[in-house]
């Protein structure tokens, strides 16, 4: 007997051949698909470890076909098959759940491949791919291993504290605060993300607002709408700040750029910025006014343990 994830395990009556119980195979324990299996039973939606007997047989699910979901039950997700499972997860159009999105984001931020992350977390790369691409509800043990592999916390992967400001943990026992070189600042500022622009707003009062930004030819650029608070930066010297806080390790960095802001009006330049943009403004709406900040000064700081 050799199974794949998503196959149905059917147990029949030896006398009549009628189905007595069936369930979906959601976990494998051997590379070759031989028993035992983790089975989610259709009548209870519970997952148990099963060593099939002579009254059991497999109903294979064809490639791309989703396994049947019991009436009234939520769509099942696979349990973690562990480091030995090489079976492919169910396929389909990627529709990451919140946890999967956070796992993928932390993995990209750490510069880790799926294979390396799976190795560190002691799980199948196929299961990690399933977790990132499909709605899933992984076990606590899976989240603990993933958080450890990615250098974050289970709460962060679950989105706990998403409405709280970062940095509420305890400070390091022996922190070290050091200035960053201009090259380190440029490296941390580079590419794209979300930063904060500090400027005198239209009423003369200071304002700090977050914007999605890009770095193009050493200039910080962002999209906004005429008449908005960020648009008030045009023609003024402003400050632009980006940072990162590692909640788990109580450390982080920040970079501050100061320089004049100008509106980009040349049509080819506007078209090039729009074409190369990594994302659209999270605030939505019509925001087609590009503003460029050419830093006149760069400074930054990093907090690390004193022994690093």
Image (cartoon, rainbow, N blue to C red):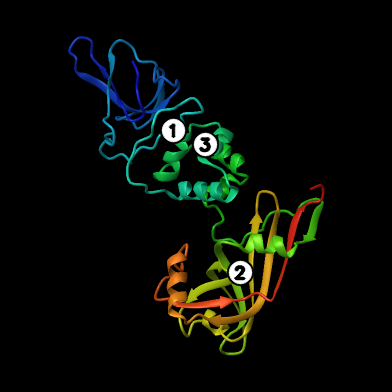
The residue lying at 37 percent from left, 49 percent from top is 95
Q: Residue 38 versus residue 92: which sits nearer the camera?
A: 92
Q: Quadrant of the N terminus?
A: top left
Which residue reaches farthest left? Answer: 16
What is the spatial separation of the Cα atoms under label 3 and label 1, in whole angstroms? 19 Å
Vertical arrangement, residue 35 with respect to residue 7, above or below? above
Percent from the top left, x then y, of residue 145? 57, 36
Residue shown at 57% from the left, 43% from the top: 112
SS state under label 3: helix
* Circle 1 or circle 2, nearest the eye: 2
Residue that label 3 marks: 115
The residue sitting at 68% across, 54% down in the picture is 169
Q: Which residue is mark 1?
A: 79
Vertical arrangement, residue 264 with respect to residue 160, above or below: below
CA distance for labels 1 and 2: 46 Å
Q: Is residue 80 above or below residue 196?
A: above
Give the side of residue 106 with respect to residue 178, left or right.
Answer: left
Q: N-terminal of the two: label 3 or label 2?
A: 3
Which sits earlier in the primary sequence, circle 3 or circle 1? 1
Q: Is residue 118 in view?
A: yes
Around disc 1, counting alpha carbons within 10 Å, would you say few (fewer than 14), some (14 to 19), or many (20 or more)? many
Q: Looking at the picture, how far across and down is residue 206, in whole percent? A: 63, 83
> In this rendering, which labeled residue sits more in front, label 3 or label 1?
3
Q: Which residue is mark 2?
A: 218
């Amino acid at each position: 007997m050799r199974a794949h994830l998503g196959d149905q395990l059917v147990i029949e009556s030896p006398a009549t051949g009628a189905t007595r119980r069936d369930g979906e195979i959601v976990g494998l324990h051997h590379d070759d698909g031989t028993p035992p299996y983790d089975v989610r039973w259709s009548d209870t939606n519970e997952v148990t470890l099963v060593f099939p007997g002579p009254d059991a047989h497999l109903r294979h699910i064809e490639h791309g076909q989703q396994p049947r979901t019991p009436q009234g039950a939520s769509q099942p997700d696979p349990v973690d098959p562990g480091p030995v499972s090489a079976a492919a997860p169910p396929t389909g159009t990627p529709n990451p759940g919140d946890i999967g999105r956070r796992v993928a984001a932390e993995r990209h931020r750490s510069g880790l491949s799926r294979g390396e992350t799976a190795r560190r977390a002691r799980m199948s790369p196929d299961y990690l791919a399933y977790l990132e691409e499909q709605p899933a509800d992984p076990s606590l043990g899976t989240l603990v291993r993933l958080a450890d592999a990615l250098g974050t916390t289970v709460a962060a992967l679950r989105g706990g504290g998403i409405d709280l400001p970062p940095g509420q943990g305890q400070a390091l026992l022996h922190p070290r605060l050091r200035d960053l070189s201009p090259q380190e600042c440029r490296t941390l500022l580079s590419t794209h993300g979300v930063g904060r622009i500090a400027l005198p707003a239209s009423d003369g009062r200071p304002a700090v607002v977050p914007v999605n930004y890009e770095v193009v030819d050493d200039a910080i650029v962002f999209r906004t709408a005429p008449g908005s608070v960020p648009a008030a930066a045009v023609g003024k010297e402003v400050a632009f700040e980006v940072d990162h806080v590692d909640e788990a390790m109580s450390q982080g960095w920040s970079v501050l750029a100061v320089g004049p802001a100008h509106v980009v009006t040349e049509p080819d330049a506007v078209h090039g910025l729009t074409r190369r943009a990594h994302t659209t403004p999270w605030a939505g709406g019509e925001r087609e006014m590009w503003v460029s900040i050419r830093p006149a000064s760069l400074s930054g700081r990093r907090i690390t343990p004193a022994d690093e």
